[in-house]
């Protein structure tokens, strides 16, 4: 039984984990109960961890610290979707514990697993039970207990894996929809795949993707997990960097700032503490922070002080950063030439192609942000599964990045209509965020698989209508769904309707849809635009 591991061992373990998730990618995708085509958990986790595997393969006999840092850095930039971001944070926390470690035993491994869990939980505003977070947390707890009895890393890892399997099975009971479908959480299953492969590598049997195995494109389905962010309600967007000058615990500062405001992000290392918080009293925040050291930079709303670039590992990978020519800029995610034209005409500086069928990575978003010649860049994810990846960008660029948590394209459009390029940061954050709740989003797509969901007997190929994030109806006749949505819009008293038709819809058919809405909603102003989006036949906004 293995007692310890070094850098080469860790390298093989992670590469094996990446291979396992790639092998099981489609199985993980199919665990997503909701049958709508979308960016899947398996696909997102595979692309995230394989970004690390690719970098590790380039390293020749790395130290444990270097291997862990390389993996964490690559995953942070390659993270896609909520599941991918959480996976990257698990390894980022592990890397923090392994810093300065040359040989890792069971106790250190257990502590590293716990550091990973802590990092992941800090990033999620509303952690939900029955997800990858639950599985990872209970596995780490089991590892800590096992390390007290036996300091062999293999023994500790076995204990973590066994508890992860038990926790995974219980996710079915922790989420009503999973229980009804009789499946486990997809992200949690992915973490178990990773732990299994790492144990196999520990025992001398590295996992590899079989030669000739088809690991290409898969039918896409929505990521089941939903991690909502809090609406921003405080006035002052306060940011600062402190040069650490003592051993005071930054967690005490985090607790104080949490009581003072919201939208808190606190990142620290041995040299600095970087803080972003929304508060009504920035003076109190700054006064408390002075106990930890000297201010390097401070920015409050319209105070546009030069932002010192944060030291990053592997900085050579960062793309060229555009010099600021203006105060504010915007990046938006969308799929389809028509939608891209809409955002461009509204003043968006950079468009990232992606959304329903392909979640862009943190690196993709970072590159777009760095191309914008502005001091502060707003990011519109326009998809719930892209928000977390976007939120990681601020730590990777000297630009000030503000993520507006838009979950749909219509929400993103409404946010841009409320964007004032000459306004102040705080005012724009408030106006754009508040506008998200003023628009209802409807979408029509198809079922990617058979499913019994929320009382609907869904068959592959059926048309599906969504109202917000909820399933509104299903039918083999798309006109039935269009009429039902139009009646809902009329009954809700909406005044403005915009219909974006997709790449698979002919203009004459789209016009008939617009005519149905105009007939059923005579008091509403109905507009028809070519969105060109894939997968979704129609995206409809109603205000």
Image (spheres, grey):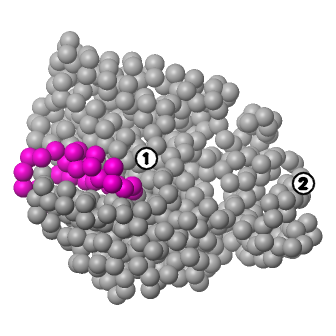
Categorize mark 2 by other alpha carbons within 10 Å: few (<14), some (14-19), many (20+).
some
Residue 415 location, quadrant = bottom right
Vertical placement of residue 437 versus 426, above or below = above
Vertical placement of residue 445 versus 302, above or below = above
In this rendering, would 428 be left or right of 519? left
Which residue is at 51% across, 49% downward? 228
Question: Where in the figure is residue 246, as x and y percent of width and height?
Answer: 6, 51
Q: Is residue 245 magenta?
A: yes
Q: Is residue 450 visible?
A: yes
Which residue is at 11% across, 63% downward? 294
The residue lying furthest to the top in this view is 149
Q: Which mark is residue 427?
A: none
Q: Is residue 333 visible?
A: no
Q: Determine contact: label 1, label 2, CB under 8 Å.
A: no
Q: Which mark is residue 480?
A: 2
Which residue is at 50% across, 57% downward? 231
Chain part drawn in magenta: 243-269
Vertical placement of residue 501 versus 197, above or below = below
Residue 239 location, quadrant = bottom left
């Amino acid at each position: 039984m293995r007692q310890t591991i070094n850098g080469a061992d860790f390298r093989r373990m992670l590469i094996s984990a990446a291979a396992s998730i790639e092998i099981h990618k489609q199985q993980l995708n199919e665990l997503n109960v909701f049958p709508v085509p979308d960016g899947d958990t398996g696909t997102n986790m595979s692309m995230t961890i394989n970004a690390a595997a690719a970098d590790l393969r380039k390293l020749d006999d790395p130290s444990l610290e270097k291997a862990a840092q390389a993996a964490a850095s690559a995953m942070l930039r390659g993270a896609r979707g909520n599941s991918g971001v959480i996976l990257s944070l698990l390894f980022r926390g592990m890397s923090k514990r392994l810093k300065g470690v040359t040989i890792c035993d069971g106790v250190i491994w257990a502590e590293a697993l716990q550091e990973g869990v802590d990092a992941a939980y800090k990033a999620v505003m509303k952690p939900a039970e029955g997800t990858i977070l639950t599985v990872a947390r209970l596995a780490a707890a089991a590892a800590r207990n096992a390390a007290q009895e036996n300091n062999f890393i293999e023994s500790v890892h076995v204990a973590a894996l066994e508890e992860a399997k038990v926790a995974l099975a219980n996710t079915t009971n922790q989420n009503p929809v999973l229980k009804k479908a009789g499946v486990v959480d997809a992200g949690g299953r992915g973490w178990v795949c990773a732990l299994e492969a790492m144990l196999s590598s520990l025992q001398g049997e590295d996992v590899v993707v079989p030669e000739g195995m088809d690991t290409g494109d898969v039918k896409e389905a929505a990521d089941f997990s939903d991690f909502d962010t809090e609406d921003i309600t405080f006035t002052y967007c306060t940011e600062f960097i402190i040069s650490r000058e003592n051993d005071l615990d930054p967690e005490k500062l985090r607790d104080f700032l949490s009581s003072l405001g919201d939208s808190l992000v606190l990142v620290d290392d041995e040299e600095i503490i970087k803080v972003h918080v929304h508060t009504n009293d920035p003076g109190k925040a700054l006064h408390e922070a002075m106990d930890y050291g000297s201010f390097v930079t401070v920015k409050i709303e319209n105070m546009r002080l030069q932002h010192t670039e944060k030291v990053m590992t592997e900085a050579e990978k960062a793309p060229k950063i555009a010099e600021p020519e203006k105060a504010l800029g915007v990046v938006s995610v969308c799929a389809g030439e028509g939608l891209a034209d809409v955002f461009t005409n509204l003043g968006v500086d950079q468009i990232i192609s992606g959304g329903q069928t392909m979640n862009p990575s943190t690196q993709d978003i970072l590159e777009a942000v760095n191309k914008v010649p502005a001091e502060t860049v707003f990011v519109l994810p326009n998809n719930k599964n892209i928000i977390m990846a976007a939120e990681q960008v601020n730590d990777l660029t000297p630009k000030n990045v503000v993520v507006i948590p838009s979950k749909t394209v219509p929400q993103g459009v409404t946010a841009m209509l409320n964007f004032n390029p000459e306004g102040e940061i705080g005012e724009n954050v408030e106006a754009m965020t508040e506008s998200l709740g003023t628009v209802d989003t409807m979408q029509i797509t198809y079922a990617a698989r058979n499913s019994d969901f929320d009382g609907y007997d869904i068959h592959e190929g059926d048309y599906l209508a969504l109202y917000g994030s909820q399933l509104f109806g299903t039918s083999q006749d798309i006109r039935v769904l269009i009429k039902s949505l139009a009646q809902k819009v009329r009954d809700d008293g909406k005044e403005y309707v915009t219909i974006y038709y997709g790449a698979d819809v002919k203009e004459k058919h789209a016009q008939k849809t617009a005519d149905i809405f105009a007939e059923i909603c005579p008091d509403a102003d109905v507009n028809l635009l070519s969105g060109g989006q894939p997968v979704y036949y129609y995206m409809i906004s109603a205000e």
